[in-house]
């Protein structure tokens, strides 16, 4: 469950708490919100998106796309019409992307630090251990 007023988090599927109650954002809706961000950019996050494309134009570009692959193809076409490369579009997508659970692997590591303490001639080995969860992308940006 996600509780936030930040529109960026609508790019993550699942149950969201909003002012009026609960909403369930589907995979399609999350992908659509993500590609809207890739196209229109986000000034507060510091990436421009596709030049001349705001939210209305982005919605128009994506209106016929039924799958994530079709949304990516439409997004690439919009960037290419502005004489921008696939790599530039991918850079904007990386700026817009919030990692999703399906695209990550959780691992846990334990790090132990050993030291010797002496107490009246008797020594004991003391270990201080720290367990740290790590979130790592399991693959590079997964786009069609």
Image (cartoon, rainbow, N blue to C red):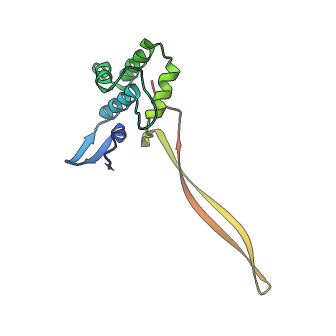
| Residue furthest right as drawn | 121
Residue 36 in percent (x, y) is at 35, 28
| Residue furthest left as drawn | 20
Task: For the C terminus, give its image quadrant.
Answer: top left
Please tell me whether residue 90 is drawn above or below residue 26 in the rendered image. above
Residue 92 in percent (x, y) is at 47, 28
Seen at 42% across and 26% down, the residue is 49
Residue 58 in percent (x, y) is at 33, 23
User: In this rendering, does residue 90 appear at all?
Assistant: yes
Residue 37 in percent (x, y) is at 38, 30
Q: Is residue 137 left or right of residue 64?
A: right
User: In this rendering, does residue 142 appear at all?
Assistant: no
Please tell me whether residue 12 is drawn above or below residue 76 in the rendered image. below
Seen at 29% across and 36% down, the residue is 26
Is 115 in front, or is 85? 85
Q: What is the quadrant of residue 67 in the picture?
A: top left
Q: Is residue 61 left or right of residue 88?
A: left
Is 21 in front, or is 53? 53
Q: Is residue 86 left or right of residue 33?
A: right
């Amino acid at each position: 469950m996600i509780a936030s007023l930040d529109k960026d988090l609508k790019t993550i599927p699942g149950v969201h708490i909003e002012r009026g109650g609960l909403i369930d954002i589907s995979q399609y809706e999350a992908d659509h919100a993500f590609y809207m961000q890739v196209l229109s950019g986000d000034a507060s996050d510091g990436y421009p998106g596709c030049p001349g494309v705001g939210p209305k134009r982005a919605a128009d570009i994506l209106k016929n796309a039924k799958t994530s692959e079709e949304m990516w193809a439409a997004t690439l076409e919009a960037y290419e019409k502005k004489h921008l490369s696939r790599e530039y579009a991918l850079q904007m997508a990386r700026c817009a992307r919030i990692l999703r659970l399906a695209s990550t692997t959780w691992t846990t590591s334990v790090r132990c630090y050993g030291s010797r303490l002496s107490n009246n001639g008797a020594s004991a080995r003391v270990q201080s251990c720290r367990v740290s969860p790590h979130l790592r992308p399991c693959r590079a940006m997964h786009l069609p």
